[in-house]
Amino acid sequence: MKLKRFGILMLCLCVVFLAGFSACRTGPQQNGNQQGSKPIDVTVAHWGQEKILIYLPLYVAIDGGFFKDQGLNVNLKYSGNDDQVFATVISGSAQFGVGDPTFTAISREKGGPGKVVAMLVGAVANWGVTNKQNIQQINEPSQLGGLRVTSFPSPSTTFTILSEIKQTNKLQKMSIKQMAFGTELSALERGEADLAIVLEPQASIAESKGYRVVWSVAKYYGPFALTGITTSDDMIKSNPETVQKMVNAIQASLDYIRSHPDETTEIAARNFPSLDKSVVKNAVTRMTNDNSIPADARISDDAWRKTLTVRNKVGDLKSIDAGFAAVDNTFAAHALNRDQKKTTAAGQQ
């Protein structure tokens, strides 16, 4: 009887030992996720009705496994224009939004909620394309005088910026033609426009057809918070860990794009299989060189002030300074510091 009890005791001790050994092996991983834990489902409201290449860091975070590394299972919810994306987030139908971040400032000025926690597109990712031989490289806004220029419909950022340029430079003879996304080049072909303002890959597609890219709005404006990761105040308060994981993945994606251009092109090509790979490569290079793909997920004061100024000039926002309350850079700063520590540790090995 005593021998039997001793055997049971030894069996229990072995179970406890093995359980403890297993816990040591399956503890928190370097990637921020706990092996074997159930992924957190996250819905991201996405501008438009399909993927667009200027949001490449988001797709790299998905296909490159950076969201997975953080224990997130991200689902995209195509939500229409920028104001609809923000409305989807505030209504609780999505935890995060990808679109014009200034709607957080507009909301807060009216007493509403909303925060922008990361930068996804760090410049005005628009390029002017033409098939008119008499239109040369555009370096000054005055060169837009008398031109028929396409734009995405109001209240898109593109329309707001073009309206601000027209108003500030008193370009009465410049006409802005609001057009559905994807129809800009056809307007050139029909002779209904002189300059098509497009995103990538449309700019590179146009070049492959013999059209010329004559204006980089990205270079003209410099740092600009075109697209951000927005969320609600409730999400930040109740699920700060999830917000941090989201921003960690975005920063890791931004790092990867600049350090692995060939692999990034492969990911982009998989997401846009109908495009020739040379077009994809050219587009990725242009977006990186013109800094529409930022190196840093933080929203700089300079980029944010430019963005708010445009909204202020067209009357969407009364106060520029008040808009800074809509930015929460703590998550992006932590993500950047985390990546820098990892890089330093890797270099010391």
Image (cartoon, rainbow, N blue to C red):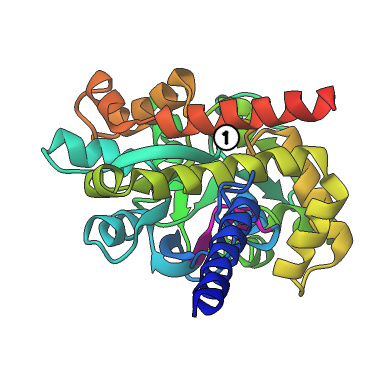
The residue located at (78%, 52%) in the rendering is: 264
Image x and y of residue 204, in percent: 77, 54
The residue where tag 1 is placed is 123
Viewer-nearest residue: 340 or 16: 16
Where is the C terminus found, in terms of image quarters? top right
Image x and y of residue 140, in percent: 61, 24
| Residue 314 location, quadrant | top left
Image x and y of residue 123, in percent: 57, 34
Circle 1 SS class: loop
The residue located at (56%, 35%) in the rendering is: 122
The answer to whether 78 is drawn above or below residue 114 in the figure is below
Q: Residues within 10 Å of mark 1 (few under 14, many from 20)?
A: many
Q: Is residue 72 visible?
A: yes
The residue located at (38%, 54%) in the rendering is: 96
The answer to whether 64 is drawn above or below residue 30 in the figure is below
User: Magenta segment, which residues?
Assistant: 65-74
Image x and y of residue 336, in percent: 58, 29
Instruction: Name the amino acid type tagged 1.
Output: Ala
The residue located at (56%, 53%) in the rendering is: 33
Viewer-nearest residue: 48 or 147: 48
Residue 192 falls left or right of residue 47: right
Residue 304 falls left or right of residue 205: left
Q: Is residue 24 magenta?
A: no
